[in-house]
Image (cartoon, rainbow, N blue to C red):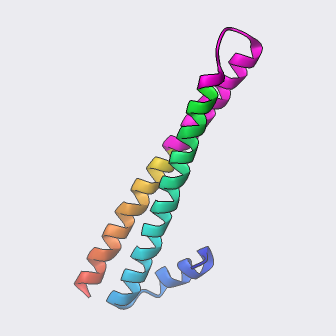
Amino acid sequence: MTLQESAVAVSAEETATDHSAVADKYELEAITADEKARYHAQMAANYRARATGGSKQATTYRSIANHCDRLATTYQKAAADARAIASMERQLAEEK
């Protein structure tokens, strides 16, 4: 489901099936965000491992590692948010 299709689906939610479909979309989004979070956390660890000593290169590696840490944290939050929305959509489906 594309973003545009998702927006249309949300605006047209009428049935439990509609809410379940949107919930599934958010679950997939959460899985993707988790994968990206793990990737960036690993990249941070890799760059941090190369940041030895006090050279300019080491400082650059630490800066890149910090950037990757921020991305990992952002993706972790996005995954949690997507799971929360999926849960709410499932509740809406149960109420239909």
The C terminus lies in quadrant: bottom left
Q: Position of residue 37 (x, y in %)?
A: 52, 47
Q: From the viewer's perspective, is residue 15 above or below residue 21?
A: below
Q: Is 68 included in the stretch rendered in magenta?
A: yes
Q: From the viewer's perspective, is residue 95 above or below residue 55?
A: below
Q: From the viewer's perspective, is residue 49 above or below residue 32?
A: above
Q: Tell me: 59 left or right of 10.
A: right
Instruction: Residue at 50% x, 84% y: name it.
Output: 9
The N terminus lies in quadrant: bottom right
Q: Is 29 included in the stretch rendered in magenta?
A: no
Which of the 4 quarters of the picture holds residue 68? Answer: top right
Q: Position of residue 82 (x, y in %)?
A: 43, 62
Number of numbered callouts drawn = 0
Can you name the residue that lies furthest to the top here? 54
Q: Tell me: 57 left or right of 16.
A: right
Instruction: Residue at 47% x, 74% y: name it.
Output: 25
Of residues 52 and 85, the one drawn nearer to the viewer in this rendering: 52
Can you name the residue that lies furthest to the left here? 95
Q: Position of residue 16 (x, y in %)?
A: 32, 88
Magenta span main SS: helix
Magenta-tinted stretch: 49-73
